[in-house]
Image: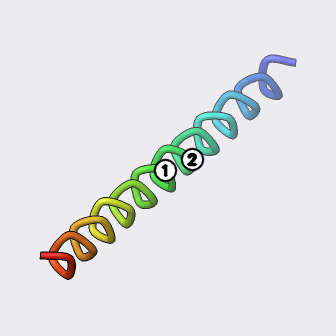
Amino acid sequence: MVNRKRENTTLDGQKERENTTLDEQKERENTTLEGQWKERAT
């Protein structure tokens, strides 16, 4: 039981980490895209 719980928490941690990194990547891409649009607009 304890081993399973530990595996679950590490898996959850990995998933959360992957999600946050993915979100950060998307945000970075969005900001760079917005910056590009602004540069084109001016």
**Residue furthest out toward the front:** 42
In the depicted view, which residue is nearer to us: 42 or 8? 42
Q: Is residue 20 above or below residue 36?
A: above
Position in image of residue 6 (x %, y %): 70, 26
Q: Residues within 10 Å of mark 2 (few under 14, many from 20)?
A: few
Report whether 31 appears left or right of 39. right
**Residue furthest out toward the top:** 2
Say which residue label 1 marks.
Answer: 23
Q: Residues within 10 Å of mark 1 (few under 14, many from 20)?
A: few
Name the image quarter holding the N terminus.
Answer: top right
Q: Is residue 1 above or below residue 23?
A: above
Q: Could you tell me how many numbered marks the image carries?
A: 2
Q: Is residue 12 above or below residue 37?
A: above
Say which residue label 2 marks.
Answer: 19
Q: Quadrant of residue 42?
A: bottom left
Task: Say if mark 2 contacts mark 1, CB within 8 Å.
Answer: yes
In the depicted view, which residue is nearer to us: 8 or 2? 8
Position in image of residue 27 (x %, y %): 39, 54
User: Three-letter amino acid code at disc 1?
Assistant: Asp
Position in image of residue 32 (x %, y %): 27, 68
Q: CA distance from mark 2 to mark 1?
A: 6 Å
User: Three-letter amino acid code at disc 2?
Assistant: Asn
Report whether 31 appears left or right of 30. left
Q: Tell me which residue sits at (49%, 50%) in the image.
A: 23
Q: Nearer the viewer, mark 2 or mark 1?
A: 1
Q: Tell me which residue sits at (33%, 71%) in the image.
A: 33
In the depicted view, which residue is nearer to us: 13 or 37? 37
Position in image of residue 8 (x %, y %): 76, 31
Report whether 24 appears left or right of 12. left
Q: Quadrant of residue 7?
A: top right
